[in-house]
Amino acid sequence: MYVFLISCSENVFSQQSFILAGDTIGENQNIIYKNIEDLFIMGSYSLDINSDGINDFNFYASYYYGNSSTTKSCSVSSLNNNSISLTSPGSGDPKIHEINDQIGTTCYWGNNNYTLIYSYSNNVPPLGSGSSGIWWNVYDKYLGVRLVIGSQIFYGWIKLGIYSATSCFIILQEYAIQSSSQTIQSNKNNNTFEVYSNPSNEFIIVNLNDLSSDPNEYIIRIINTEGLIVKQNQIKSVTSSILIEDLSSGFYMIQLINKKTHELFQNKIIIQR
């Protein structure tokens, strides 16, 4: 009989219900973080925040100056059922988060195209002007985002600025999202096992690295969010392929168990279809 003692910090199913704006390390959670060092957006730009090959959010900036009118426009859209943190329920304004704000279950969320700033002015009769949005000349602030993968929810932030003094453009600075990297090291130490590709939809590759000289000492289990063992395999080589095409989309715990010592190593996988 195996007895598994899993702390909350190691359990993928106790995914923290918020992320702190500006946090790049994370406590009791994995975070994907990228610093892109001030990407200036003029026109359209799509962001794949968790690097899974699927665009999650789209930014758009435009500036027009003509003889008859001038317009400035910056906006952000959520894609593929993802969401953006708002100032209030049903609001059309994305919230401006400060560093260390909690972005998570207590936020108000919306899935739409949202104005960051917009203005127009007529330079010839009939004269007139108007504006909307709350992100005017903002810099070093955070946009809260929520990512949906299957039945799982991940919270993140995007640090950006809006320049609107003369022309108009978006400055994308850095971003982070709760998640797992393409190759995830076990929580126990850095010389355990790797799992890739992750997320995956047909099979995963398990690499023992230098964990053991005898792969036959290990069995591998995949456990769903209800704690049920949905797959168990005998490891036969240092690098093994495991079919997962019969498993539903979602988050799973993968456990590597030494049959002699009962030592347990853990990892996390996402099945995405």
Image (cartoon, rainbow, N blue to C red):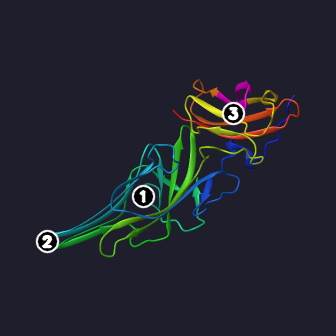
Q: Earlier in the sequence, mark 1 or mark 2?
A: 2
**Vertical side of 45 occupied by 244: above or below:** above
Q: Observer-nearest residue: 33 or 216? A: 216
**What's the magenta region?**
221-241
Marks 2/3: CA distance?
64 Å
Instruction: List x then y, in percent, for residue 41.
Output: 37, 61
CB contact under 8 Å: marks 2 and 3: no
Q: Quadrant of the N terminus?
A: top right
Q: Helix, strand, or loop for circle 3?
A: loop
Which residue appears farthest toward the left when viewing the image? 125
Residue at image location 59% in from the left, 35% down from the top: 250
Numbered label attached to residue 67: 2
Tell me which residue sits at (56%, 28%) in the image: 202
| In magenta stretch: residue 224 | yes
**Of callouts 1 and 3, the N-terminal one:** 1
State the residue in front, 269 or 152: 269
Q: Residue 114, relative to residue 127: is it above or below?
A: above
**Residue under numbered circle 1:** 91
Between the residue at mark 1 and the residue at mark 2, the CA separation in whole angstroms equals 34 Å
Is 41 located above or below residue 9 in the figure? below
What residue does disc 3 label? 226
